[in-house]
Amino acid sequence: MSDVNGTWLGTYWQDGNPTRFEVVLVQSGNSLTGNVLDDGYLGEAKLSGEVVGRRISFIKLYFTSSPDAVEYYGTISEDEDYIQGQWKINSWDFGPWEARRSGESLSLEVENKAEKKVPVTIGKP
Protein backbone atom coordinates (compact mmCIF):
# COMPACT_ATOMS: atom_id res chain seq x y z
CA MET A 1 0.00 0.00 0.00
CA SER A 2 1.22 3.48 -0.86
CA ASP A 3 2.05 6.05 1.83
CA VAL A 4 0.62 9.50 1.04
CA ASN A 5 1.06 11.13 4.46
CA GLY A 6 2.25 14.72 4.24
CA THR A 7 1.84 17.96 2.35
CA TRP A 8 1.10 17.98 -1.37
CA LEU A 9 0.88 20.82 -3.89
CA GLY A 10 -1.47 20.31 -6.78
CA THR A 11 -3.62 21.68 -9.56
CA TYR A 12 -7.09 20.83 -10.78
CA TRP A 13 -8.60 22.04 -14.04
CA GLN A 14 -12.22 23.15 -14.37
CA ASP A 15 -13.43 24.21 -17.81
CA GLY A 16 -9.77 24.41 -18.86
CA ASN A 17 -8.86 26.83 -16.05
CA PRO A 18 -6.22 25.71 -13.52
CA THR A 19 -6.61 26.18 -9.76
CA ARG A 20 -3.65 25.50 -7.46
CA PHE A 21 -4.20 23.87 -4.07
CA GLU A 22 -2.31 22.63 -1.04
CA VAL A 23 -3.47 19.50 0.75
CA VAL A 24 -2.28 17.85 3.95
CA LEU A 25 -3.05 14.12 3.86
CA VAL A 26 -3.21 11.96 6.99
CA GLN A 27 -3.27 8.24 6.29
CA SER A 28 -4.01 5.52 8.84
CA GLY A 29 -3.99 2.11 7.18
CA ASN A 30 -6.33 2.46 4.19
CA SER A 31 -8.22 5.41 5.72
CA LEU A 32 -7.46 8.94 4.56
CA THR A 33 -8.36 12.33 6.05
CA GLY A 34 -7.01 15.79 5.46
CA ASN A 35 -7.43 19.50 4.81
CA VAL A 36 -7.30 21.35 1.51
CA LEU A 37 -6.71 25.02 0.78
CA ASP A 38 -7.60 26.14 -2.76
CA ASP A 39 -5.82 29.15 -4.24
CA GLY A 40 -9.12 30.64 -5.31
CA TYR A 41 -12.50 31.75 -4.06
CA LEU A 42 -13.54 28.28 -2.84
CA GLY A 43 -11.06 28.36 0.05
CA GLU A 44 -10.70 25.64 2.66
CA ALA A 45 -12.14 22.14 2.61
CA LYS A 46 -11.88 18.84 4.46
CA LEU A 47 -11.52 15.43 2.89
CA SER A 48 -12.02 11.79 3.73
CA GLY A 49 -11.32 8.73 1.65
CA GLU A 50 -9.07 5.73 1.21
CA VAL A 51 -5.85 4.43 -0.29
CA VAL A 52 -5.85 0.91 -1.75
CA GLY A 53 -2.57 -0.17 -3.31
CA ARG A 54 -1.62 2.71 -5.63
CA ARG A 55 -5.23 3.93 -5.99
CA ILE A 56 -6.53 6.94 -4.04
CA SER A 57 -10.09 8.22 -3.71
CA PHE A 58 -11.60 10.87 -1.50
CA ILE A 59 -14.53 13.24 -1.08
CA LYS A 60 -13.75 16.97 -0.64
CA LEU A 61 -16.28 19.19 1.17
CA TYR A 62 -15.78 22.95 1.28
CA PHE A 63 -16.40 24.64 4.63
CA THR A 64 -18.34 27.65 3.38
CA SER A 65 -18.45 28.32 -0.33
CA SER A 66 -19.94 25.25 -2.03
CA PRO A 67 -22.46 22.69 -0.76
CA ASP A 68 -21.51 20.13 -3.44
CA ALA A 69 -19.16 17.27 -2.59
CA VAL A 70 -16.26 16.82 -5.00
CA GLU A 71 -15.14 13.24 -5.67
CA TYR A 72 -11.47 12.65 -6.49
CA TYR A 73 -9.96 9.48 -7.97
CA GLY A 74 -6.34 8.94 -8.84
CA THR A 75 -3.25 6.82 -9.18
CA ILE A 76 -0.16 7.21 -6.99
CA SER A 77 3.23 6.93 -8.71
CA GLU A 78 5.56 4.09 -7.76
CA ASP A 79 7.92 6.51 -5.97
CA GLU A 80 4.89 7.91 -4.06
CA ASP A 81 5.75 11.53 -5.02
CA TYR A 82 3.07 12.16 -7.67
CA ILE A 83 -0.67 11.59 -7.98
CA GLN A 84 -2.86 12.16 -11.02
CA GLY A 85 -6.49 11.49 -11.70
CA GLN A 86 -9.97 12.89 -12.25
CA TRP A 87 -12.44 14.81 -10.09
CA LYS A 88 -16.19 15.16 -10.51
CA ILE A 89 -19.15 16.99 -8.99
CA ASN A 90 -22.32 14.94 -9.48
CA SER A 91 -22.44 14.03 -13.18
CA TRP A 92 -22.33 17.55 -14.61
CA ASP A 93 -18.80 18.81 -13.86
CA PHE A 94 -15.47 17.01 -13.99
CA GLY A 95 -11.82 17.39 -14.93
CA PRO A 96 -8.23 16.28 -14.36
CA TRP A 97 -6.09 16.90 -11.29
CA GLU A 98 -2.52 16.22 -10.19
CA ALA A 99 -0.41 16.71 -7.07
CA ARG A 100 3.24 16.44 -6.06
CA ARG A 101 4.75 16.17 -2.62
CA SER A 102 5.55 19.57 -1.18
CA GLY A 103 8.91 21.18 -1.97
CA GLU A 104 9.86 20.82 1.70
CA SER A 105 11.36 17.43 0.97
CA LEU A 106 13.28 18.89 -1.97
CA SER A 107 14.81 21.64 0.19
CA LEU A 108 15.75 18.98 2.72
CA GLU A 109 17.59 17.09 -0.03
CA VAL A 110 19.53 20.22 -0.98
CA GLU A 111 20.51 20.79 2.66
CA ASN A 112 21.66 17.17 3.00
CA LYS A 113 23.79 17.44 -0.13
CA ALA A 114 25.32 20.73 1.07
CA GLU A 115 26.28 19.14 4.41
CA LYS A 116 28.12 16.34 2.62
CA LYS A 117 30.41 18.72 0.71
CA VAL A 118 34.03 18.41 1.68
CA PRO A 119 35.62 21.77 2.47
CA VAL A 120 38.58 22.73 0.34
CA THR A 121 41.61 24.04 2.20
CA ILE A 122 43.32 26.89 0.35
CA GLY A 123 46.67 26.99 2.04
CA LYS A 124 47.54 27.48 5.70
CA PRO A 125 49.22 30.57 7.13
Image (cartoon, rainbow, N blue to C red):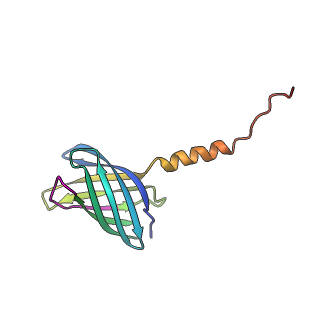
As displayed, is residue 33 above or below residue 12? Answer: below
Residue occupying the far right of the picture: 125
Residue 76: percent from left, percent from top: 40, 61
Quarter that holds the C terminus: top right
Residue occupying the far front of the picture: 64
As displayed, is residue 50 above or below residue 93? Answer: below
Residue pictured at 49% horizontal, 48% vertical? 104
Residue pictured at 19% horizontal, 61% vertical? 69
Residue 22: percent from left, percent from top: 35, 50
What's the magenta region?
A: 63-74
Residue 54 in view: no
As displayed, is residue 124 above or below residue 79? Answer: above
Residue pictured at 46% horizontal, 59% vertical? 80
Count every numbered label the image shows and give the total: 0
Residue 87: percent from left, percent from top: 24, 58
- Position of 83 compared to 45: left or right? right
